Structures are given as structure tokens and as C-alpha cells.
Image: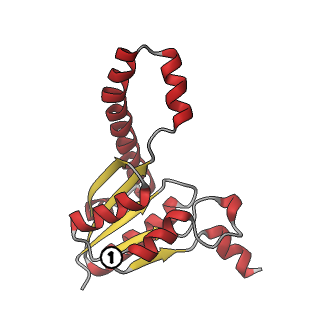
Amino acid sequence: MIRSMLYATDLGLYAPYVMQHALALARTFNADLHVVHVVEPMGLFAESVLQSYLDERALSEWQRQGVNTVMATIEQRVLDSFREELGEGEQDLKLIQSVRVIQGDPCEVILDQLRKLSVDLLIVGSHSDATAAATPLGRTAARVLQLSTVPVYLVPSLQRRRNDDI
């Protein structure tokens, strides 16, 4: 029985399409829906650019406060986009129990959230990059499929489905 689900989103081009699948499943099973978006840590190049413009104290403060502010802003934008996407679908919005934006390696964070939330199903999109239509699975989707301890509902990208229809 499916009582709770985790929708892992990259907020990419196909995210609204995958979200519709997640909501349809939540309605069907009358299940709680949790949403997670993972922000990868800042790369070495970005960090070195910041170091060249900020002194050590300012950089430390930015790392402490700035990252939290950015994460909270992204979380609010995710919620706002869901509200906009759902419009009058207030019932669907009530299915969403939590929205989390977490920094880290996408696969590791998703698998960690599976354990912490004790969900029964994971929902992911196959690929977010429209330019990589020849690649059937994105890196994160492939890793999560291999390592997940719960069933994974994989939604193919619209671009890939359109190409297959031709």
C-alpha cells in the first residue's frame, strides 16, 4: 500500500509535467506527498570568485547567512510555482505535506530523504535537459534507480516521448 511518496524535482523544463504525475498518484492512493529539490554545492570556480571579492570575514558570513537565505528563497519559489501551477486545485495543494530544498549531492540527498520520511514510492523525471534527448536517463535518475530501497515511478521527458511518436 502506498501511504506516502517523495517527488524529487530538479525544477527543470519538465518539472510541471512530472508534478502532475505525482499529484495524480497522491490523489489515487490518497497518499501524502513530500517534495524535495536538491541544490548542488557551489563549485570551486564560484568559490574562488567570491574569495577574490570578499574578505575572509565577509565570505564566512555569506556562507553562513547567504546560503540559508538562498535556500529559503528557492523553497518559497517552489511553493509559489506549485500554487501558480495548481491554480484552483486547492485540494491538490493539501496533498503536499512538505517542500524541502537541501544542499548536497542530489542522489545522496534523495536517498537520505527516502529513509527519513519513510516513503513508499519515489517519483522522478527521467531527464530535465531538453538538449540531451539522446540520453535516456539523466545521471541522478540513473543513480537513484540503482540505489533506491523503494519502488521508483519514472516519468519520461515530453521531448523523448514526442521523438518516439515520430
Residue 162 found in image quarter = bottom right
Q: Which image quarter is the N terminus in?
A: bottom left
Which amino acid, by three-letter code, is at mark 1? Leu
Find numbered disc 1 in the image and state the secondary structure of the residue it sits on. strand
Q: Residue at x 43, y 70 (%)?
A: 144
Residue 122 found in image quarter = bottom left
* Residue assigned mark 1: 121
Tally of marks? 1
The x, y position of residue 146, in whole percent, is 45, 76
Residue 152 seen anywhere in this rendered image of the structure: yes
Does 102 appear above or below 52? Answer: below
Query: Which of 76 and 83 lies nearest the eye of the viewer?
Result: 76
* Left/right of residue 98 with respect to residue 131 in the rendered view: left
Few, some or many residues within 10 Å of mark 1 (<14, 14–19, 20+):
many
The residue positioned farthest toward the right in the image shown: 166
Q: Which image quarter is the C terminus in?
A: bottom right
The x, y position of residue 73, in whole percent, is 37, 37
Q: Residue at x 51, y 15 (%)?
A: 53
The x, y position of residue 104, in whole percent, is 39, 49
Q: Residue at x 34, y 65 (%)?
A: 111
Query: Which of 139 and 18 lies nearest the eye of the viewer?
Result: 139
The x, y position of residue 57, in whole percent, is 34, 15
